[in-house]
Amino acid sequence: MSTEGMEYYRAKYKTLEDLPGVGPATAAKLRQSGYRTVEALATAAVSELVAAGIGEATAARIIEAARRSMAITFVRGDELVKLRKTVRKLTTGCPSLDRLLGGGIETQTITEFYGEFGTGKSQICQQLCVTVQLPYEKGGLEGGALYIDTENTFRPERIMQIAPRFGLDPDEVLKNIIYAEAYTSNHQMVLLENADEVIKENNIRLIIIDSVTSHFRSEYLGREMLASRQQQLNKHLHKLIRLARAFNAAAVVTNQVMAQPDVFFTRDVRPVGGHILGHMSHTRIYLRKGRGNIRIAKLTVSPNLPEGEALIRITDRGVEGEEDA
């Protein structure tokens, strides 16, 4: 099988109406359900389109056409190597953290930063909103950022502090950050489900949810609601990874932690979200406080990197490595 013409992100069909079998009425139903681009349909499930009021056979044909358009198919291992050349690394702007991550945040995957409050999770996210706008040769992705904020932690003033360090105009950087505050878990899910058109129109290459578990944790209380919470969180994370793959974007989430009361003589914590978040996050970094403004970043999960630690500092200029001191 030749890889000629198999560029993953160059769709044959540009709009929903271009797809075979999609007329104005069907397109309206799809858009109303949050499917506004061919890329979103290519990673959709038939059951999701059926729930939107589209017949099962029609839904299957639409999804098949979208997938063929984007060359989502079986490939040999050697061809996969070529296809994965579209995967890029986004610099964090912190050399020690980049080394820990094997060059930076990988696109088409979910990277999770978890830790107690004040450990630098949101600081890293806000710096990524700047570095994603850098040119490729400087470790950026030459694109914008979509920031879904669930804890009201995003600060434009912080972006204005960080941007000059990377030689960027703060006002121009802010123009390329699409921000939305989520007030409930349902609102959070709706924002992401309707994000594909925003992502495409604004050349978004970084999707951030800060934090991904906050609303779910506060709204689904007690063991009797645990299954419902995990089902909704699972659906939310699957939508996130679909968007990251469809648009070759980096997906970054932050997560809270909880104490382990059954562990004695140690201050051990674990990330919220259980196995659902553990399985969906390709790379997990645990952040904890050191002395002063020092933070320790520990890589705990990665599909191809060994565990390790890096020292980072939170300064007026953003997140820096020890070598920047």
Image (cartoon, rainbow, N blue to C red):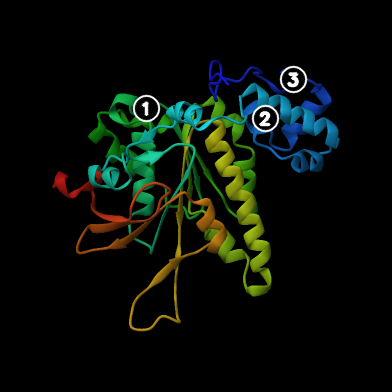
Q: Could you tell me how far apart the alpha carbons at marks 2 and 3 are, in whole angstroms?
A: 10 Å
Question: Which image quarter is the N terminus in?
Answer: top right
Q: Which residue does the numbered mark 2 point to in the structure image?
A: 36
- Horizontally, residue 271 falls left or right of residue 2, namely left
How far apart are the two marked residues, 1 and 3, measured between alpha carbons?
A: 34 Å
Instruction: Tell me if mark 3 has few (under 14), some (14-19) or many (20+) residues whose alpha carbon lies within 10 angstroms of its own.
Output: some
Q: Residue at x 31, y 62 (%)?
A: 288
Can you see residue 135? no
**First in sequence: mark 1 vs mark 3:** 3
Q: In this view, does 68 lie above or below 206?
A: above
Is 200 drawn above or below residue 315 in the view shown?
Answer: above
Between marks 1 and 2 in the image, the one whose residue lies nearer the viewer = 2
Binning the other alpha carbons within 10 Å of mark 1 as few (below 14), some (14 to 19) or many (20 upward) gives: few
Considering depth in this image, is 38 or 171 the residue closer to the camera?
A: 38
Residue 236 visible: yes
**Nearer to me, 117 or 108:** 108
Query: Mark number for residue 259?
Result: none
Residue 317 occupies which quadrant of the picture? Answer: top left
Q: N-terminal of the two: label 2 or label 3?
A: 3
Residue 141 horizontal/vertical position (percent): 39, 29
Position in image of residue 194 (x %, y %):
64, 38
Q: What residue type is labelled 3?
A: Glu
How many neighbours does mark 2 have within 10 angstroms: few (below 14), some (14-19), or many (20 or more)?
Answer: many
Q: In this view, does 155 lie above or below 167?
A: below
Judged from the image, the secondary structure of the residue bearing numbered disc 3 is helix
Tag of residue 17: 3
**Displayed quadrant of residue 116:** bottom left
Q: In x, y percent, where is residue 210?
A: 47, 51
Disc marking residue 172: 1
User: Dots 1 and 2: beta carbons under 8 Å?
Assistant: no
Q: In this view, does 325 lie to the left or right of 120?
A: left
